[in-house]
Image: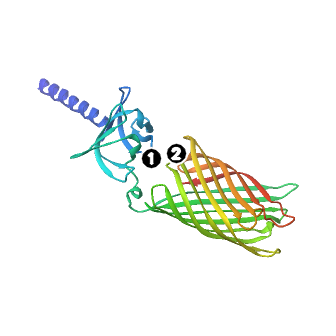
């Protein structure tokens, strides 16, 4: 009796130890064999740049892996690989030789590709022509001063992008209002929209429509509309850069001065880049140059740093410069605003 109990107890302890070890191992694990011989277990999250990809581990969360340092990838489940050519493959292993040529092995087929030819691992659905991708940010800055001078300042802005494989819609705008001793001292706003149609991975054409108002610059409404041709140099989480330009029709309505309309050359630049994992630099620039009068030159720029805090919440510091070479007499041509903002980015 005692021997039977002891034997059953020992067997149960062995089963429990095996179960504990089994539960402690990842149920699904991809394996990376690095060039230095080290091995990592985890899950390939995605590759959203030309040089690196995300790899989720149980001990350090999602880490960034430099693809150049990987010798072999062995997938527990097939990984969708999108090449720059637009072709996709479901692969279970990727083996790279000393020349940087990677053999992508699927269940039934294999394909070789260089580092530059591999665009994405597990790409988002829109990159495969499925649905839309929505991203953007919105920010607010408030300032209240009480004492010898009562001053209130409200500043808000937003930027959004809706992207399909071949089409994109961009929206951005801002609003600024200041009061001093209950007297309105500043009020201006702008709204810009743009549609892009991609004829290749980088080149696109489209159209832009914009509205701008500045009460204290005597500008009731400036309307801009026209076609654009542009080029997207970079498109990734780490860095984005696109430039577009074209002929623009401009109509300006003033409170006191004579209304005006003219043809202009317009351009737009959008750039952002993560300097570190927690600091993002950004710069946005819009410009108009009258074809009839080169002194009638207007441009706006927003330059700053974003600091991701938690779950999409970001803080930012920004310098906004507004220049209007055709401003009415008695109105300053340049306005500069420094601000600290709190917002949300998705």
Residue 90 placed where, x, y %? 29, 48
Quarter of the figure with the N terminus: top left
Residue 25 lies left or right of residue 324; in this view the side is left
Percent x, y of residue 316:
65, 49
User: Which numbered marker is on residue 63?
Assistant: none
N-terminal-most mark, 1 or 2 = 1
Residue 64: where, in percent of width, then height?
45, 38
Say whether marks 1 and 2 touch (CB < 8 Å). Answer: yes
Viewer-nearest residue: 203 or 74: 203
Residue that numbered label 2 is attached to: 238
Residue 346 appearing in the image = no
Q: Is residue 57 left or right of residue 94?
A: right
Badge 1 is on which residue?
48
Figure quadrant of residue 149? bottom right
Residue at the spot 71% in from the left edge and 59% down from the top edge: 299
Q: Residue furthest top?
A: 3
Q: Residue at x 37, y 35 (%)?
A: 100
**At numbered mark 1, what does the secondary structure look like: helix, strand or loop?**
loop
| SS for callout 2 | loop
Residue 293: where, in percent of width, then height? 76, 66
Would residue 214 be found to the left or right of residue 224 on screen? right
The Cα atoms of the two marked residues, 1 and 2, are separated by: 8 Å
Is residue 175 placed above or below 233 in the rendered structure?
A: below
């Amino acid at each position: 009796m005692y021997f039977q109990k002891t034997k059953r107890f020992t067997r149960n302890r062995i089963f429990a130890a095996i179960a504990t070890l089994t539960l402690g191992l990842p149920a699904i694990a991809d394996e990376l064999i690095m060039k230095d011989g080290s091995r990592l277990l985890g899950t390939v999250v995605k590759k959203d740049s030309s040089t690196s990809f995300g790899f989720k581990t149980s001990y350090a969360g999602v880490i960034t892996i430099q693809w150049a340092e990987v010798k072999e990838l062995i997938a527990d489940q097939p990984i969708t690989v999108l090449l720059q050519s637009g072709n996709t493959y479901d692969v279970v292993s990727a083996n790279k030789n000393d020349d940087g040529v990677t053999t992508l092995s699927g269940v039934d087929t294999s394909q070789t590709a260089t580092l530059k030819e591999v665009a994405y691992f597990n790409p988002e659905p829109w990159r495969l022509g499925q649905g839309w991708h929505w991203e953007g940010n919105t920010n607010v800055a408030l300032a209240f001063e009480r004492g010898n001078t009562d001053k209130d300042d409200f500043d808000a802005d937003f930027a959004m992008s809706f992207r399909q494989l071949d089409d994109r819609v961009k929206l951005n705008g801002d609003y600024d209002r200041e009061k001093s001793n209950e007297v309105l001292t500043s009020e201006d706003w702008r709204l810009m929209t743009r549609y892009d149609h991609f004829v290749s991975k980088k080149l696109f054409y489209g159209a832009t429509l914009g509205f701008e108002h500045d009460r204290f610059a005597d500008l009731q409404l400036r309307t801009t509309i026209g076609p654009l041709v542009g080029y997207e140099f970079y498109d990734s989480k780490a860095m984005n850069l696109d430039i577009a330009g074209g002929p623009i029709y401009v109509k300006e309505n003033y409170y006191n001065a004579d209304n005006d309309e003219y043809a202009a050359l317009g351009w737009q630049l959008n750039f952002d880049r993560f300097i570190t994992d927690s600091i993002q630099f950004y710069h946005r620039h819009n410009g108009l140059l009258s074809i009839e009068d080169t002194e009638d030159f207007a441009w706006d720029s927003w330059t700053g740093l974003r600091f991701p805090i938690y779950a999409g919440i970001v803080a930012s510091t920004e310098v906004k410069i507004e220049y209007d070479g055709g401003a009415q007499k008695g109105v300053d041509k340049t306005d500069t605003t420094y601000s600290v903002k709190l917002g949300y980015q998705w």
